[in-house]
C-alpha cells in the first residue's frame, strides 16, 4: 500500500515444459485502485482479499466465471475472459505512467521515432525535439523501462504499441487526462471528490466517461 504497487508472482512454464519458474510483475496502482483495495480490505469477512461468494480463496475457475458475468452485466456484445483484462490493462498502465509527463500524442511519436526508429527528421521536427528537453526525453525512456519491468515484454517495438494506444482509445483528446480511469461513473464522485471540484464536466464527457 505504501509503495502503491501490486506485486504479482506468476508461475510460467518453460518452453521445454520441464518445470515452472516464477516471474514477478510490478504493477503501479492509481488513486482509485488504492481506495478500492483499502475499502475491500475493510469489508472482507475472511482471510482472503479476493474471495468467492462463499468466502473462500478465489480460484481460476471462479475468476473466469466472475469475469464472464461482469461482461454479461455490462451488455458487452462478446464473451470476455481474464486475459482480455491484461491487454486492456496495459493500455491503462501506459496511460498511468505517461500522465505525469503531460505529453501529447505527437510528442510521444517524436520521442519514439527519435530513439527507437531510423525515421529521418525534418528541421521542424528536430526543433520540436530540442524544445522538449533532456529531462522529458529521459522521463519518456523511463516509462518504457517501467512498462517493460512489469509486462516482461522484451521488445520496445511491442511496448510502444501500448504507449501510443493509450492515446488512441480517446482520439478526441490530444493529451491524457488525469481521469483516465477504469472506475465506473457511479464511483467517480467518491473516488475523485477533490479532483472533480477543479474539473469541468465537459472534460469528463469528452473523454467518454
Image (cartoon, rainbow, N blue to C red):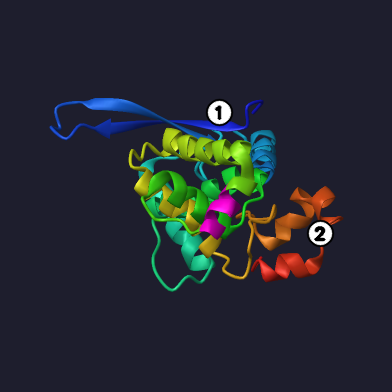
Nearest to N terminus: mark 2 or mark 1: 1
Can you give x and y, in whole percent of width and height, for residue 193 in the image? 82, 51
Residue at image location 47% in from the left, 40% down from the top: 144
Question: Which numbered tag is attached to residue 193?
Answer: none
Above or below, 118 against 10 in this view is below
Question: Quick check: is 125 in the magenta stretch?
Answer: yes
Q: Is mark 1 on a helix, strand or loop?
A: loop
Can you give x and y, in whole percent of width and height, for residue 175 in the image? 64, 58
Residue at image location 51% in from the left, 72% down from the top: 75
* Name of the residue lying farthest toward the front: 123
Nearer to me, 70 or 112: 112
Question: Which numbered tag is attached to residue 199?
Answer: 2
Residue that label 1 marks: 47
Q: How crowded is mark 2: few (under 14 residues within 10 Å), some or many (20 or more)?
A: few
Q: Taking the image as drawn, is residue 1 in sight?
A: yes
Above or below, 130 against 22 in this view is below
Nearer to me, 101 or 23: 101
- The residues colored magenta run 123-129
Residue at image location 85% in from the left, 55% down from the top: 198
Q: Taking the image as drawn, is residue 28 in sight?
A: no
Question: Quick check: is 23 in the magenta stretch?
Answer: no
Q: Residues within 10 Å of mark 1 (few under 14, many from 20)?
A: few
Can you give x and y, in whole percent of width and height, for residue 88 in the image? 46, 55
Amino acid at each position: 500500500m505504501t509503495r502503491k504497487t501490486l506485486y504479482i508472482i506468476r508461475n510460467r512454464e518453460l518452453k521445454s515444459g520441464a518445470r515452472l519458474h516464477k516471474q514477478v510483475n510490478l504493477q503501479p496502482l492509481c488513486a482509485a485502485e488504492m481506495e478500492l483495495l483499502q475499502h475491500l480490505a475493510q469489508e472482507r469477512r475472511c482471510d482472503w482479499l479476493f474471495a468467492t461468494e462463499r468466502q473462500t480463496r478465489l480460484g481460476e475457475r471462479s475468476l473466469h466465471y466472475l469475469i464472464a458475468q461482469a461482461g454479461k452485466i455490462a451488455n458487452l456484445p462478446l464473451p470476455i475472459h481474464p486475459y482480455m483484462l491484461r491487454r486492456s490493462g496495459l493500455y491503462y498502465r501506459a496511460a498511468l505512467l505517461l500522465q505525469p509527463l503531460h505529453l501529447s500524442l505527437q510528442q510521444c511519436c517524436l520521442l519514439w521515432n527519435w530513439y527507437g526508429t531510423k525515421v529521418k527528421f525534418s528541421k521542424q521536427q528536430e526543433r520540436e525535439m530540442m524544445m522538449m528537453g533532456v529531462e522529458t526525453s529521459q522521463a519518456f525512456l523511463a516509462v518504457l523501462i517501467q512498462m517493460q519491468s512489469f509486462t516482461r515484454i522484451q521488445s520496445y517495438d511491442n511496448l510502444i504499441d501500448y504507449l501510443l494506444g493509450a492515446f488512441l482509445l480517446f482520439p478526441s483528446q490530444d493529451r491524457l487526462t488525469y481521469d483516465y480511469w477504469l472506475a465506473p461513473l457511479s464511483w467517480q464522485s467518491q473516488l475523485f471528490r477533490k479532483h472533480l471540484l477543479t474539473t469541468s464536466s465537459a472534460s469528463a464527457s469528452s473523454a467518454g466517461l
